[in-house]
Image (tube, coloured by chain):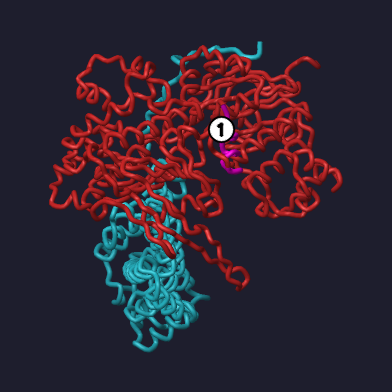
Chain colours: A red, B cyan
Amino acid sequence: MADSPVLTVSDLTVTYRGRGRVVTAVSDVSLAIDAGRCLGLVGESGSGKSTIGAAVQGIIPADGKAEATGRISIAGRDLTPITDPAWAKVRGADVTSVFQDPMRSLDPTMTIGRMLNRYTGSAEASVAALERVQIRRAGEVLKKYPHQLSGGMRQRVMIALALAPGPRLLIADEPTTALDVSVQAEVLSVLRESIEDAGCAVLFVTHDLGVARHMCDDIAVMKDGVVVEAGPAEDVIARPTDAYTRRLMASRITLDTDRARPVGAPEVAVVASMEDVLTQLERPELDVAAAWQSGDLTWDAFAGPTAAVGAATGLDHVTLVGHVTRPSLAVNEVNKTYSTRVRGRRVDNHVLKDVSFEIGYREAVALVGESGSGKSTLLRIAGGIETADTGVVNAQGVAGEGTQVIFQDAGASLTPWRTVEELLRERIEHTATGKGKTRAEMRAMALSTLELVGLDESVLAARPTQLSGGQQQRVAIARAVVVPPSVLLCDEPTSALDVSVACSVLNLINLLRHSLGISIMFVTHDLAAARLIADRVLVMTGGEIVETVPAERLAQDITTDYGRRLVDAVLA
Amino acid sequence: MPFSRKSTLEKIEKAQQSGARDTAWSALGVGEKLSLIGVGVIVLIALVGPAVMPYSPIIPSGGQLEPPLSSGHVLGTDVLGMDMATRLVAGMQRSLFAALVVTLVSAAIGTLIGVAAGFKGGWLDTALMRFTDLFLAFPAMIIAMAIAAAIGQSLGSAMIGIIVVWWPLYARLVRGEVRRVVALPHVQAARVSGVKGWRLLWRHVIPAITPTVVVTASLDIGAVVMTLAALSFIGLGTPAPAPELGRMASDGMKYFLNAWWVAVLPSVVIGLLAFAFNYAGDAIRVVLRRTGV
């Protein structure tokens, strides 16, 4: 009995019925976790990893829409994959969980103390529980409500709550995904130490192989409901045998990634217009994958075919030659203050303090900083969505063609009831370039831009809701560059995407920069992505640009406290 | 053996297309389907009913207070000997027509003012919303009574009275919705691409608020039927012998003890109308939410 695993899942299959279709979320999965071990369940969206997380907590609803077969056994107790009354004794006692969004799982009407005391029995024991997750001044925290704590603190409280009943099994479902990267590392180490102390088995669900490697003893990689590869963490990471695992590994970008070439495995990184480019280069027979590897083919190769792109889109001002001295974007002493009223008193929040910087012609600049540092406000002012209180923002280009913005949530930034063609045409109509163009001409422009971003004619008639997340971001990018702006402002365009999709979007932005000759302002808190896209990285804290570092020497040259923390946050 | 890998990627089942087509209709519950059918039947009766009934609703056609199921009069006759069934069908038509017009006009006025206030903002917003609040501040029924009494006894004046107190609700609702939608990322993104003014409003904002207005209006029809009947009940509709359900119910009250049907039947019809439209409003909401407009 003592040696048997805490959690055993055998032949688990879960199907969902909805909208007249049957979708198999999990297919024939078996796994087991021993006490004191941590199993990482890694996969991209739709891989079925969260469904397994739900099944072993008995929270797949018995509403007839889900069907499940297979056996689950927790601490020697046999259970069904679909929820039933037997689960009530297990849940919250033998099995507890930490979810992605602690704000949703913590009761907003209760103080932390009241929630914790239920398990620990006394305030002293609760203080000890909070101190175990490295919360200082635990006595004060006990009196607070969830909304009064920061995201990182909430997740620590959540960990303390989950471990308080002394569970045999802890489910951690993307516990740090919603946190700022700089906080993520701290919370992960707290979680790691806490579960080592508690000695329980852990099922760690994540999309991030780097996080899994830091946290887990074993890793199971999932794709389309099936475990494609499983084994000890170091083996899976160092010697992946499955093609999909290798692709996931290749999609991770770090501070050592080669900036001159596309990222991701070759099969992910292939751009749709690659053949055209090779034809333009007069090297149609070139083995692209090999050329990337050897460094034979770099981004600069795309500079040549630009004239062809210009001809295809009907834009004669797309040129890459010539020396331009004036910056594409000049931001001069910009100030912005938000005022709110708290109990009748005016409270000023000075989010931007005399911010000045320039982005040169064809230059890419990344702006990194934590939430609330003012980086997004700066982007919104540069994009004309908000206005500065004082200061000047100047973008090159004729009316309507100075700046364009790509938003973090591409799906939400596309009007759901307009077709892709309508969205693109609308953009063309409202620029100087589009004046007097016929519908057919605009359609041709839209089409060639869609090809440039790796989509084809079939999406023209589609509405945004019919597209995948990656396709939506490509459409959003196509709308922004169908008439190329001087500066493309990107607001964390990859943070909501799966890693392999994120890679292809980063490659696309790089490709557009080199082939259309546009400047890039890239706002992010992911230093690895910033380094990949940008020539210079500006670090922002508290509404000021505190340092400027060349991307080439990012890891070495960054000096500010926050910058160092960001460097450490990029898990190798 | 901690893991077993029984399946391969090829074994993954493809999503199976089941036989039934996935329409909006299939998303509805039984009650919702019945309510939509019920509303269809009611509208049909109201449209063609008066034309096929054998009697006139305002000319006596039989003995006084004949009970239901008496020869020639399925639902009996009233105190003047007019056929109840004919009068009820005619009353339904009047009620339904009046409720539709009142709801449409109120929704139109309210939407216009709400969109102007929410989209333009600034002083126009303040001015229009203060004006709207002025109407909301008074008890609706009392104002409607006062207006209907001032213009004179008729269905038209009752309708005007209700419109005057009904539109502010739409103005408030639509203004809030417009403010919410304008702040959504897709509207900001459209602004960034250069869309502004009428085009922005028409292409990117209005389609988002239409479902809310349509659902609210369809839910309101039932309430307007009730309010119209109430005004008519207290004597502010068209005077007898016009076939108005509220008036028929109040007139019938005098004979309630020896001829229940003259008071009860009109009340039942009022209840049915209100109930069916309320339920149908819910069904419409389900359909609109599904299609994701």
Disc 1 target residue: A570
Task: Please report the residue visible at 66 percent of the width from the left and 37 percent of the height from the top.
Answer: A186
Looking at the image, can residue B209 be seen? yes
Which of the chains bears the disc numbered 1?
A: A
Structural crowding at the residue carrying mark 1, measured as other residues with C-alpha within 10 Å and reported as few (<14), some (14–19) or many (≥20): some
Q: Position of residue A311 (x, y in %)?
A: 16, 36
Q: As displayed, is residue B83 above or below residue A204? A: below
Magenta segment boundaries in residue numbering: A560-572
Kind of residue indicated by mark 1? Val
Q: As displayed, is residue A450 above or below residue B103? A: above
| Quadrant of residue B170 within the rendered picture | bottom left
Task: Please report the residue visible at 47 percent of the width from the left and 30 percent of the height from the top.
Answer: A499
- Where does the N terminus of chain A fall, quadrant-wise? top right
Q: As displayed, is residue A134 above or below residue A284? A: below
| Quadrant of residue B103 within the rendered picture | bottom left
Q: Position of residue B116 (x, y in %)?
A: 34, 69
Q: Nearer the viewer, residue B17 or A299?
A: A299
Tell me if A352 is positioned left or right of B158 in this view.
right
Q: Where is residue B43 in the image (x, y as percent from the top left)?
A: 32, 59
